[in-house]
Image (tube, helix red, strand yellow):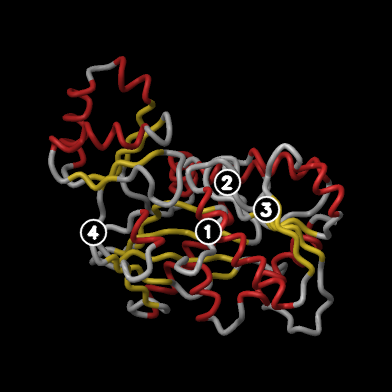
Amino acid sequence: MPKGKGAAKLKIQVLAGGISHERDISLKSGRRVADALADFGAEVIIREPDHQLLKNIKADNPDVIWPCLHGASGEDGALRDVLALSGVPFVGSDAASARLAWDKSIAKALVSKVGIQTPPYVTLPKETFRELDAEGVLASITHSMSLPVVVKPARSGSAQGVTIVHNQTELGRAMVDAYVYCEVAIIEKYIEGTELAISVIDLGAGPIALPAVEIEPLNGHYGYDSRYTAGETNYYVPARLPGVVLEKAARQAILAHETLGLSQISRIDVIVDSQDTAWFLEANVLPGLTETSLLPQAIIASGYSLGEVYHSLAEAALRGRK
């Protein structure tokens, strides 16, 4: 695990902001990461990923880049392709793996092939939805899955555009809401159970799962407001489930991380049902790092400081890309 403060400190450029729907969250994550790194002794520079990006990287000459960009461009691989051109190591997955995880339908298909259970789902591109008998298609889907179902954008973060649909009349509106964020929507069977966020980090010796965070939203749905408004959600870390169940879920999270080819940091979201089956929901290439986010809670529960782990991740990125 992380080294202590005797370790050599790095010059780290933190990227935060961007133009995605999650810009505000990115700015908060970036500030929290920068503060933690600075407290640990690193030299930190915060930058926006704008038209001056490559010029700023050259001028700053950092040892490592710490991307704190959520949503499209930050997690869809586009930014990571550009960062690779700079030649400077960066924390997290490469562009190809980020693309696999960012598209929930692709991620679900890949993890299911290695035996990880994921709720039954249908993927509907917006154009296909328009061209076909939309009402008939939706009726057939809900008949085959039975309600409730979850409608979500195939590519989006922070639960934006996600709706739990309990009756047929809500489904059309839910599809419209999902298409606001992405041209492809997923209709997924709703699994009732305990929601867990399992953060996975790899500091060079292989991926390990941090203590699972149990999520209990007070309004019943872990949506955008529940994620980023203090007091809207109860968190329990470690989660209030039997150890054998948590160990199995942790192994599954590590397998999902490896199957998608993710590097150094990810968060795997699962639902554990009443039969203790863990269902894969999605993988997050760059989990939230704000004051209410889940990965920081898992780090603290594991007995380390945020600065220790964030700096160790930067060191791992530096070693891995030399």
Which numbered disc, 1 or 2, marks the residue that appears first in the sequence? 2
Q: Earlier in the sequence, mark 4 or mark 2?
A: 2
**Circle 4 or circle 2, nearest the eye:** 2
On screen, residue 86 versus residue 163, left or right, reads right
Q: Is residue 222 positioned above or below 9 on the image?
A: above
Question: Residue at coordinates 61% horizontally, 55% vertically from top-left?
Answer: 68
On the image, which quarter does residue 96 sit in?
Answer: top right
Q: Nearer the viewer, mark 3 or mark 4?
A: 3
Q: Amino acid at mark 3?
A: Leu
Q: Residues within 10 Å of mark 2 (few under 14, many from 20)?
A: many
Residue hosting label 4: 192
Residue 282, percent from left and from top: 44, 51
Q: Nearer the viewer, mark 2 or mark 3?
A: 3
Q: Give the SS element for disc 1.
A: loop
Q: Amino acid at mark 4?
A: Glu
* Kind of residue indicated by mark 2: Glu
Q: In the rendered structure, which disc, 1 or 3, sits on the residue that comes first in sequence?
A: 3
The tag on residue 15 is: 3
* Numbered mark located on residue 75 in the image: 2
Marks 1 and 3, how far apart at CA: 14 Å
Report helix, strand or loop for mark 3: strand
Write the residue at 47% across / 62% down.
252
CA distance separating discs 2 and 3: 13 Å
In the displayed structure, would residue 240 be above or below residue 267?
below
In this view, the residue in front, 188 or 242, is: 188
Please give the label number shown on residue 287.
1
Q: Secondary structure at mark 2?
A: loop
Q: Earlier in the sequence, mark 4 or mark 1?
A: 4
**Which of these two is toward me, 192 or 71?**
71
Q: Does residue 65 appear left or right of residue 190 in this picture?
A: right
